[in-house]
Image (cartoon, rainbow, N blue to C red):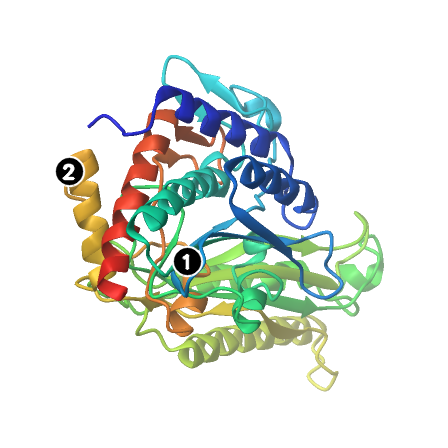
């Protein structure tokens, strides 16, 4: 279906997105301030109300709140301005921070193009059109777009969505997190991220003491055994009808650190364990099992050193600790919620297809909104791909279509809420 938006309007959106991609905003490396300022300029050209709101002592990382209308807030769009980093720019077809359009595919390629700057652009222009709808229908409502900071740090930041909710600066009877894709995402899995730290004993690798194992304990190899044991364990196959093809998933060793010098037995080693939780998953049970496996491995390695020296009276050389780094729950809304149905109907109208309505695998900040009483589509937006990967892209034609869908969703849903 042809979008209502003119080609010149689409051109403005594309140019705006290219500008946002060119402004680096890698999480915890580049402050989002310059992205926020560029959004502010676009809002001024569209005559939309825009405010910059920072958490205390975070003035260089302001959130942006854009508002259409003057009445009570009835709908909320949310998108994050920060991105992940690029490990190797030489693997990209085009420079990752240039915002390049591939004419053959009509894809705009660049870091953050679909996660999440493209969705922000679509939502902003949807607010521009919704302001006209509000004026025409004389609605006493307002529609908000929150462009937030620090989402990529683990979807549990206190300076982005959490700060705005706690200060009651954003609200609504419904919300959409503007992630890419035409699946109507009714929820997301939870996240538990742990750090396992193993401490051992330093000794020179060339000494007699290490050769006879009378001194030294290798923290790195002990940690490696723990990680392999976690990977080999038959975890419960927790399932949920809202998450087809997804289950509880435990991934040990996503980041590893250990040792200090090539000729020294490492006395410190650490690793992150990434765990994706289903709604029915017991965090306490997961933690208990990981603690048990860690304890068993550490005891086995200490017994190994005792046996090597035939000394069963010496103290343990290895120890381990587990620290929770990130934790957030799975969250869903009912697949028959009026917001979900409004989204499905809008996709049918604009794209002439029936979208799926499933939860997604990666966690996001949708749980904060749902827990605050705001029914939330945890992901719906322009078509894109290679999120967090090489040649991340967004479909240029899908941007205008997404704006039309957003306007239709809000127009119909707000009528139910007015």
The answer to whether residue 90 is seen in the rendering is yes
Say which element carries label 2. loop
Q: Indicate the position of residue 130 as horizontal and vertical percent values.
A: 36, 46
Q: Quadrant of the N terminus?
A: top left
Give 147 or 334, whichever is nearer the viewer: 147
Q: Quadrant of the C terminus?
A: bottom left
Q: Indicate the position of residue 319 as horizontal and vertical percent values.
A: 67, 75
Horizontal relation, residue 324 to residue 284: left or right:
right
In the rendered structure, which disc, 1 or 2, sits on the residue that comes first in sequence?
1
- Residue bearing the label numbered 1: 142
Q: Quadrant of residue 41?
A: top right
Residue located 46% across and 42% down the image: 124
| Res 71 label | none
Q: Indicate the position of residue 23 as horizontal and vertical percent values.
A: 64, 34
- Which residue is outermost to the bottom? 313
Q: Indicate the position of residue 249 as horizontal and vertical percent values.
A: 38, 60
- Residue bearing the label numbered 2: 353
Give 370 or 129, whichever is nearer the viewer: 129
Residue located 82% across and 61% down the image: 203
Q: Nearer the viewer, mark 1 or mark 2?
A: 1
Horizontal relation, residue 5 to residue 239: left or right:
right
Residue located 47% across and 32% down the image: 392
Say which element carries label 1. strand
Horizontal relation, residue 376 to residue 171: left or right:
left
Give 216 or 247, whichever is nearer the viewer: 247
Task: Please tell me how crowded label 1 is: few (under 14), some (14-19), or many (20+) other residues with Cα within 10 Å.
Answer: many
Relative vertical location of residue 87 with respect to residue 155 in this rendering, above or below: above
Q: Cα distance, mark 1 to mark 2?
A: 30 Å
| Labels in figure, total | 2
């Amino acid at each position: 279906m042809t979008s209502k938006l003119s080609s010149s309007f689409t051109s403005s959106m594309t140019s705006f997105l290219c500008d946002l991609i060119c402004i680096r905003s890698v999480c915890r490396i580049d402050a989002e301030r310059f992205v926020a300022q560029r959004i502010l300029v676009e809002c001024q050209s569209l005559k939309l109300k825009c405010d910059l709101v920072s958490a205390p002592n975070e003035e260089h990382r302001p959130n942006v709140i854009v508002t259409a209308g003057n009445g009570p807030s009835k709908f909320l769009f949310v998108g994050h301005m920060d991105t992940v980093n690029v490990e190797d720019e030489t693997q990209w077809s085009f420079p990752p921070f240039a915002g390049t359009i591939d004419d053959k595919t009509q894809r705009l390629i660049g870091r953050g193009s679909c996660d999440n700057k493209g969705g922000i652009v679509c939502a902003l222009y949807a607010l521009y059109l919704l302001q006209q709808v509000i004026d025409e229908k004389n609605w006493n409502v307002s529609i908000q777009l929150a462009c937030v900071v620090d989402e990529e740090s683990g979807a549990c930041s206190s300076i982005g969505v959490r700060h705005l909710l706690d200060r009651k600066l954003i609200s609504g009877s419904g919300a959409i997190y503007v992630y890419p894709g035409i699946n109507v995402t009714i929820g997301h899995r939870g996240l538990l991220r742990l750090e396992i730290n193993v401490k051992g004993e330093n000794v020179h690798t060339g000494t007699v003491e290490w050769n006879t194992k009378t001194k030294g304990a290798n923290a790195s190899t002990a940690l490696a055994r723990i990680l392999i044991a976690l990977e080999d364990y038959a975890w419960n196959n927790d399932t949920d009808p809202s998450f087809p093809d997804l289950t509880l998933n435990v991934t040990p060793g996503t980041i590893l650190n250990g040792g200090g010098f090539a000729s020294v037995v490492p006395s410190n080693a650490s690793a992150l364990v990434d765990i994706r939780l289903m709604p029915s998953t017991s965090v306490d049970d997961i933690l208990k099992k990981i603690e048990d496996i860690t304890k068993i491995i550490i005891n086995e390695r200490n017994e190994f050193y005792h046996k090597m020296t035939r000394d069963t009276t010496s103290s343990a050389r290895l120890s381990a600790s587990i620290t929770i780094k990130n934790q957030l729950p799975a969250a869903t809304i009912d697949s028959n919620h009026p917001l979900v149905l409004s989204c499905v109907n809008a996709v049918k109208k604009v794209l002439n297809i029936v979208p799926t309505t499933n939860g997604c695998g990666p966690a996001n900040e949708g749980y904060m909104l749902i827990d605050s009483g705001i029914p939330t589509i945890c992901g719906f937006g322009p078509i894109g791909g290679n999120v967090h990967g090489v040649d991340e892209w967004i479909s240029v034609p899908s941007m205008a279509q997404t704006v039309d869908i957003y306007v239709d969703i809000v127009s119909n849903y707000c009528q139910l809420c007015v």
